[in-house]
Every structure is written in C-alpha cells, then in structure tokens.
Image (cartoon, rainbow, N blue to C red):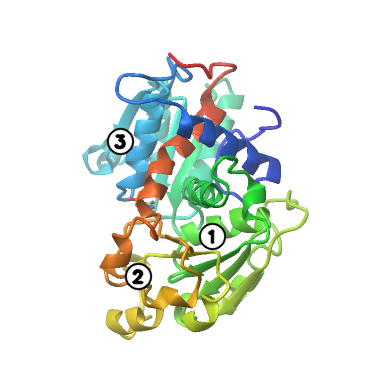
Amino acid sequence: MSGWSHRHLIDLAAFSLEDFATVLELAQRFRVMPVSGSRKLPALQGRQVVSLFFEPSTRTRSSFELAARRLSADVQSFSPSSSSLSKGESLLDTALTYVAMGADVLVVRHRCAGVPAALARDLDRERRSGGRPVAVLNGGDGLHSHPSQGLLDLFTLARHFAPEQPAPAALSGKTIVIVGDVLHSRVARSNLWALTACGAHVVLCAPLTLLPEAFTQFVAAPPPGQAMDPVVQRGTIRIERQLERALPGADAVMTLRLQRERMHQHLLTSLESYHRRFGLSQARLKLCGASVPVLHPGPVNRGVEMSGDLLDDPHRCLVAEQVRNGIPMRMALLYLLAARGDELREA
Ligand code: CP
C-alpha cells in the first residue's frame, strides 16, 4: 500500500493521517469481502504468525489468530505457563526460538509497558547481523498502548458515521466522550492518538483518582524517542468530572473497564457508587441524542461500567460490532506488516 513505512506496530503516536486512511480502507475491503469458512485469501500463504501473550486475552488473541488464518498464514500460539520461560529462558531467546522456526510476525501482549518495543529493537538488531526480518505487533503493553484496539474502535466509529466510506474524515469535528478508568487504560491512550489525529474532539470523564488533569496535554507532544508529531492539526481533549456535563453534545460514548488488577490503592469508594456516578444506562443516555452509540473495548464488568440492558441493546451498543470489526482490522494490520506485494485477491 502506498506510503506505508512501518516495520512494526507499537503505538499510534507515530501514525500519520495517511496511515490511518490506509488502515481503514484496507479493513473496509476485508470487512465487505465474502470470506468465511474454508474460503481464505492467499495473502500470507507460507508466512507464520505467532501470538506471544504474557497476559490473558479473549478478543485480541482470538481475532489475530482468526485474521491470520483468513489470510492463509500458519499460526502458532504460545502459552507462558507451559513454556520454557519457567526454566529460565529469556523473552528474547523465546522470541528468537520462534523466529528460528520461521515466524514472520510476533503479536506480543505483556503487562509491562515497552516490552513489544524492546523486542522489536532487539529483533531489528539481530536482522542487521544476518537474521530474518520479523514484524512485532503490540497486542497491548501495560498502560502504554493497544494499537489494534484503538484502530478497530476508530474503524467502528468511522463505519457508524460513514458506513460506505469509513475514512478518517468521518471523525472530523465529532465529539467522542470516553468515560471511566483512563489512568489504567492503554485503550484510552491509543484512542486519544487515533481520534485526535482524525480531528475528533475528545471529552474524558472520570473521578480525579482515575483521570489526572495532565491528560488534557496527552497529545500535545510526541512521546519520548519520537522526533515529531506526523499529524499537523489534532482535535482537542477536555476533561469533565460529571457525566451530566460530559454527555450533552456527544456524537459517541465509549466507556472503559475498571482495571482492578492494575489498581494498587483504593481508588474507588465502592463499585456501586462508581456505577451511580459514572455507569452508563439507558436513562443516563437521555442526556445525549437517541442515536448516539455506546462502545466498550471489553471485557465488560456488567452492571459497573454499563447496565446489562444497555450492553444487550444492539441498537445502541456497538460492543459486538467492535468485536466483529476486530477481525478485518487485524487482517489489515497483518497484511500491511507481512504481505509481500499484490496478493490481495480471493482464493
Ligand atoms: N479489548 C481487549 O483487549 O480484550 P481482550 O483482553 O479480551 O483481548
């Protein structure tokens, strides 16, 4: 695809508007292509995708593996608890073992921020000294980044606003409210880079313990190690502390999981009071238009971030659509990182 220059996918701060357009266009092509059952595309025939997940996952891991199979790749799935990591093998040596077995793409999830980037650097160094080229795809690292989730959320929103042509322009000028545990959310961070790049205005809403004031400046400068922001003009970020002030004027609302596994202090008085103040429900959504959709990256704490009846309402809630869109989006990413040319034809 013209203009695509990324060897790895680590986060979305380095994405230009053209990169977002390329990914959305390709995901849309895969989304509308009739690929199911035994019908596969040959784009990654002979290539090998390995999912190295050091943290639990349902959606990301399964949809990357499905996406790889739909592109005819061989798929290997790694389980840390039954691997030789327990015998003292390092993460790099584990990765190099898969590379020696022919891996072309490593999809990596780790609880520590920076692990996929460090692995990509190490593998690039190996390559320079005669090793094979390998792409690292970040499947979520600590609080840092979850780029494939940010992109599938962007795709879901773009398809909602412009079903026939889900391009970045579909988000321009839109107000997207993100509610909940922003502090611990790599999904929120990836969404902030993606949404503001496309010209959306983001309203963040949470208590101070889950949303420090500094988040208004989150996209003001590129992250350390990145020389410049490839996006000339980004949308804005604003903070509201009450849903009653955040929801009016919203074009879409995304709520985030309370990441209790990452909370090492008592940041909430109780789940009941959190739900009362920040939980989404049909009644609460009367504060915004009747057609305003609700998103959640999953997994959902039913009855905490949103009520069960809202989660089950297909007219209002796009959670299942986000999961569906995860497959073509991850096909697009695997294609861009691992296909060698004009292999985008049906088998
Ligand atoms: N949204 C997300 O990353 O879900 P999983 O943890 O199930 O992969």
On the image, numbered disc 1 is attached to which residue? 189
Q: How many marks?
A: 3
Q: Using the numbered discs, state the Cα–Cα distance from disc 3 to disc 2 in whole angstroms.
A: 31 Å
On the image, numbered disc 2 is attached to which residue? 305
Q: Inspect the image, locate mark 3, and give the three-letter code of the amino acid beneath it.
A: Phe
Circles 3 and 2 in contact, beta carbons < 8 Å:
no
Residue in the picture at 52% in, 36% down: 27
202 left or right of 112 in image: right
334 left or right of 22 in image: left
| Dot 2 or dot 1, earlier in sequence | 1
Q: Nearer the viewer, mark 2 or mark 1?
A: 2
Quadrant assignment, res 72:
top left
- Secondary structure of the residue carrying tag 2 is loop
Residue lying at the far left in this picture: please name it.
82
Within-10-Å neighbours for mark 3: few <14, some 14–19, many 20+: some
On the image, numbered disc 3 is attached to which residue? 78
- Secondary structure of the residue carrying tag 1 is helix
Q: Quadrant of the C terminus?
A: top left
Q: Using the numbered discs, state the Cα–Cα distance from disc 3 to disc 1 in whole angstroms.
A: 27 Å
- Return the residue nearer the eye: 313 or 341: 313
Within-10-Å neighbours for mark 1: few <14, some 14–19, many 20+: many
Circles 3 and 1 in contact, beta carbons < 8 Å:
no
Residue in the picture at 54% in, 76% down: 248
